[in-house]
Image (cartoon, rainbow, N blue to C red):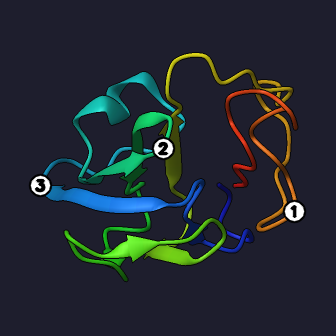
Amino acid sequence: MRVTDVHVNRVPMDGRVRERRHREGTHHPAFRSDAARNERMEWTIDTRLGELQVVQIAGAVARRIVPYRSPGEDVLRGERLGLVRFGSRVDVILPQGVRTPVRVGQRMRAGLTRLDVPGTAGGGAVS
């Protein structure tokens, strides 16, 4: 995400938050490979298709991740999951079998861009 992007991240699929883990770390630009050591919030969501992971990664400017959900909460696709302050990154690891038409580097639109293909195992994930 760029500094000018909206940094509210939404729930990709209906499910239940199993785990939310905050990991402290560095604050390199999120697009660089050394951002693997950056501060992050790791989410595990149990869905009807299996385990979904969302990783919010703070960038050089961000330095703050604000979670909106807690473990044990039921969540619906499109609801707000959390916020990463300016110039950060979010990785979504989909359950096995979910195909995606999204390409690397493609611009996403919150609540509109689907991560899955309708009619596949995904059943309606959005960014």
Q: Is residue 10 above or below residue 73?
A: above
Q: Residues within 10 Å of mark 3 (few under 14, many from 20)?
A: few
Tags 1 and 3 touching, CB below 8 Å? no
Q: Earlier in the sequence, mark 1 or mark 3?
A: 3
Q: Can residue 84 be seen in this view?
A: no
Numbered disc in front, either 1 or 3:
1
Query: Which residue sits at x=82%, y=25%?
Result: 103
Q: Look at the numbered disc 3 and give the secondary structure of its residue.
A: loop
Where does residue 113 sit, x and y in percent of width and height?
Answer: 85, 53
Amino acid type at image mark 2: Arg
Q: How crowded is mark 2: few (under 14 residues within 10 Å), some or many (20 or more)?
A: some
Amino acid type at image mark 3: Glu
Relative depth, front residue between 92 and 31: 92
Q: Look at the numbered disc 2 and give the secondary structure of its residue.
A: loop
- How far is the residue under mark 2 from the one under mark 1? 21 Å
Q: In this view, does 65 lie to the left or right of 48?
A: left
Task: Please give the label number shown on residue 24.
Answer: 3
Q: Earlier in the sequence, mark 2 or mark 1?
A: 2
Q: In this view, does 110 lie above or below 123?
A: below
Amino acid type at image mark 1: Leu
Q: Earlier in the sequence, mark 2 or mark 3?
A: 3
Residue denoted by label 2: 48
Residue denoted by label 1: 112
Tags 2 and 1 touching, CB below 8 Å? no
Q: Is residue 87 above or below residue 97?
A: below
Query: Which residue sits at x=32%, y=68%?
Result: 63
